[in-house]
Amino acid sequence: MRVLRYLLKKEFRQIFRDKIILAMMFAMPTIQLIIFPLAMNFDVKSVNIAVVDNDHSSYSQQLVAKIGASGYFKIVAAEPSFQSAIRYIETEKADVLLEIPPNFESHLIREGKQRIGVSVDAINGTKAAIGGNYLLMVIADFNKDIPVNMGRNMAAPAGMIDIAYSNWFNPLAEYRFYVVPAILVLLLTLIGGSMSALNIVREKEVGTIEQINVTPIQKWEFILGKLIPFWVVGMIVFTIGLLVAWGVYGIWPVGSFVTLYVFAAVYMVALLGFGLLISTYTSNQLQAMFVAFFFVMIFMLMSGLFTSVDSMPPWAKLIANLTPVTHFIRVIRMIVLKGSGFADVYMELLYLGLFAIVLNGWAIFNYRKTS
Amino acid sequence: MSAVTLDHITKTYDEGKVLAVDDITLQVEEGELFGLIGPDGAGKTSLFRVLTTLLLPDKGSATVRGYDCVKDYKEIRKRIGYMPGKFSLYQDLTVKENLDFFATLFGSTIEGNYELIKDIYEQIKPFNDRRAGKLSGGMKQKLALCCALIHKPEVLFLDEPTTGVDVVSRKEFWEMLKRLKQQGITIIVSTPYMDEAMLCERIALIQNGKIMSVDTPANIMAAFPVKLYAMKADNIYKLLTALRGMPEIDSSFAFGEYIHITLKDDNIEALRQKVEQQGHTHVDIKLIHPGIEDSFIRLMNQA
């Protein structure tokens, strides 16, 4: 035990002595947690629209005015022809193009129906889809209110279903509630996964591991001496992250802190095992960094941080579930936003525990003192 | 009992493609100061790594103080000190922290074996709070030696301890080794420098993973089988080129201002005349005693 205690002392000494690493470990998560969720925003507010009005009737003007007044759109151009209006989409000045055909009003009144053209710039998929949808909603609303239909409705009222909408657990459907807990997980992953891997590989690279290996030190002492400091750092970062989420975004976990910390503790063990595993397969810090980067990227993209895991194809869902990050993000959202209790999420704890055992077991098996 | 034995040790790398240690058998006695002499890449470090239980041999067996290097590695690790060729202490820890750290790993303290490291440690003590990475080359090496000695090892392995160290520090270092030897520690040291070979009690000359000769330096030099001459002239380079083309010359090497040569028929006067006829001026030839370097080169060429 004396040896382990001294190993830990030495490890903390080294961590606190390297000012850049220290700053990276604590300042980086704080700053990123503040910046990311503010910058990452899928709420589409101003869709630029170009309008081609070939009709110039009062109906067409009403429609254009309604679109402009909806609050989602900014009318950037009113062009005489489709050819000139499409230039706006080509030069990215407009996201959506609305074309009102000639005789829009007369056809609508005389024949009771009329087609209009909507062209969407699909390069920015989210904005295009959401902008297109908004436009359809506005047009549908307009359609309902035009006098022709009003008259018809009076004669034979159509059965209308009115939808009352409510967002649970995130009442205003704000993106930050969705993304802040996930980013907290991501930062923990970066620290836990790559820092531990880099640290152990550095001992290999500098050659200190040789010197350690000729001492009677036990395998478990060395490994624990490496894992415990980073586990502690991880838990501190997690706490800082929760404080930032509360201070900056007003997100205070609905669920219990004990459950939250139990999960974080097990998750850190799994991640440190992952870092240890990388370090046993690589021989210098550059390799370790790239390997860790590769996996952390996959974890990030597959974990449901940006896109919902449920909407992935089955094979991707499988991969997503094979990374510990996915499980932890799911759990942390449930606990923080929904207030899920331990009974609701204990299955996820089993998964994380399994990851911890498999990754650490594999790493220890692969870590040999003699080659 | 021998302190260290090697029995037909073979070690290859890259799945047998690179032969690092080729069937080496060797004994080092208790309390001996033993030198492994050989050029870079001869297999010295691989041999050390087998003996310090860092590397498993492909074939053969090795023991240190009677413990098997593969089976009893734990026992060996308690009893040896190893100083790798590359400085491998924590550069971001101070001198004292490094020493404390390694003492603790061996379940000891700096005070516990202070007598042993006193002479060396006193020299670096003024820099106790300096980080190891900021020490000079000689200081680093003294610190590394202290760390290897802190648990009073029975056998000390020093892999090229003087490479990259200045002449004065090298001399001091060998003085320290002699004092350690007096304390009964068996020391095995490797070096590419021939002059240091003379300071060992017995040496093994290694080349390409094979041992060419094991004996005291004096015996190895005495075993030089033919007469050795030193020769010089005004234009030494031209002379060397000329000698290399002559059939009666067995070997010729430049050694400082002289060329060391051996002859096939030992007719040195005939050679002198021949050389002077070729226009070399101020030709000076003398019979000399072979040094360890001459022996090594001769053995190397025979292999």
Image: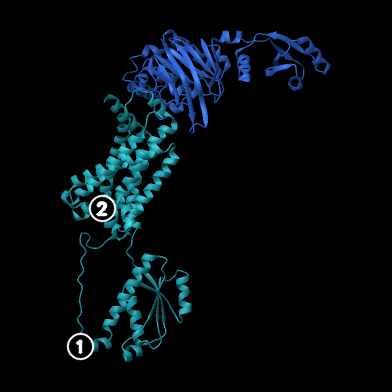
Q: Please, which colouring scheme is shown?
A: by chain
- In the image, residue B35 above or below residue B130: above
Find residue A230 and report its horizontal and vertical position in percent.
31, 38
- In the image, residue B154 above or below residue A70: above
Mark 2 or mark 1: whose residue is earlier in sequence: 1
Tag 1 subunit: A
- In the image, residue A99 above or below residue B55: below
Find residue B245 and report its horizontal and vertical position in percent.
75, 22
Colour of chain A as rendered: cyan
Instruction: Give the quarter of the figure containing the N terminus of chain A.
Output: top left
Image-based side of B221 in relation to A26, left or right = right
From the image, tell me which residue sits under label 1: A156
From the image, tell me which residue sits under label 2: A330
Local secondary structure at mark 1: loop
Tag 2 subunit: A
Label 1 amino acid?
A: Ala
Find residue A166 and report its horizontal and vertical position in percent.
20, 66
Q: Are marks 2 and 1 on the same chain?
A: yes
Colour of chain B as rendered: blue
Q: How many marks?
A: 2
Local secondary structure at mark 2: helix
Residue in the picture at 28% in, 85% down: A146
Q: Say whether residue A87 is visible.
A: yes
